Amino acid sequence: MITLSLAGLPVRERINKECIVSSDVVHVINGPNLNMLGKREPEVYGSLSLEDINQGLDVLADELGIKLSFFQSNHEGELLDYIHGIFEQSPAGVIINPGAFTHTSVALRDALLLLSCPIIEVHLSNIHKREPFRHKSMIADIARGQLTGFGHFGYHMALRSIHNSLAG
């Protein structure tokens, strides 16, 4: 087990508040504005905060016997640094909600291409029923799957999918 230091980035690991990076960890990565869940457009994104969603994932992860690491940033470079940091540790999987970077970030796509683990893209709202600029995902074709429009349950579905793929 290796403890990864990411130059003071706000990393939260559910057991000991450090980012424990090893092949048995599923990383939950959230992009810009997701720290404002529950406050920003609740009619679109729901009333749960990101912390509420993470706590629900913790409960499910305990049931499934999976370790989680959570990371959120509003800055593209910090997201890239985080992904680069987990690359050599062969994570068990990645659940990512890239937020607005879904539609614009070739750099995020390229960083995710480094990983050989299952990647599941999650969106709280159905991006295909929204403004046309939200319909295109730079991540979808490299992800194992895309869950869109299921609210916070999309994260649970993604975790179950990764668990199923790890179980064989």
Image (cartoon, rainbow, N blue to C red):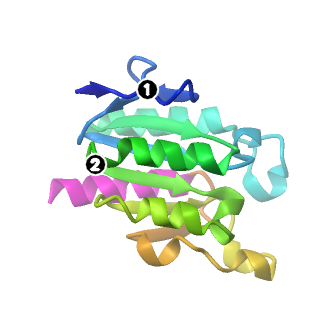
* SS at circle 2: loop
Q: Residue lying farthest left?
A: 168
Residue at horizontal 35 percent and vertical 54 percent from the top:
160
Residue 49 placement: quadrant = top right
Q: Earlier in the sequence, mark 2 or mark 1?
A: 1
Which residues are the magenta region? Answer: 153-168
| Between marks 2 and 1 in the image, the one whose residue lies nearer the viewer | 1
Q: Position of residue 146 (x, y in %)?
A: 50, 70
Residue under numbered circle 2 = 92
Q: Position of residue 86 (x, y in %)?
A: 37, 43
Residue at horizontal 50 percent and vertical 52 percent from the top:
155
Residue under numbered circle 1 = 5
Q: Residue lying farthest top?
A: 16
Residue at horizontal 51 percent and vertical 44 percent from the top:
81
Q: Position of residue 5 (x, y in %)?
A: 43, 26
Asked whether, in this view, residue 135 is left or right of residue 72, the answer is right
Amino acid type at image mark 2:
Ala
Compared with residue 10, is residue 26 higher up or lower down, i.e. above or below? below
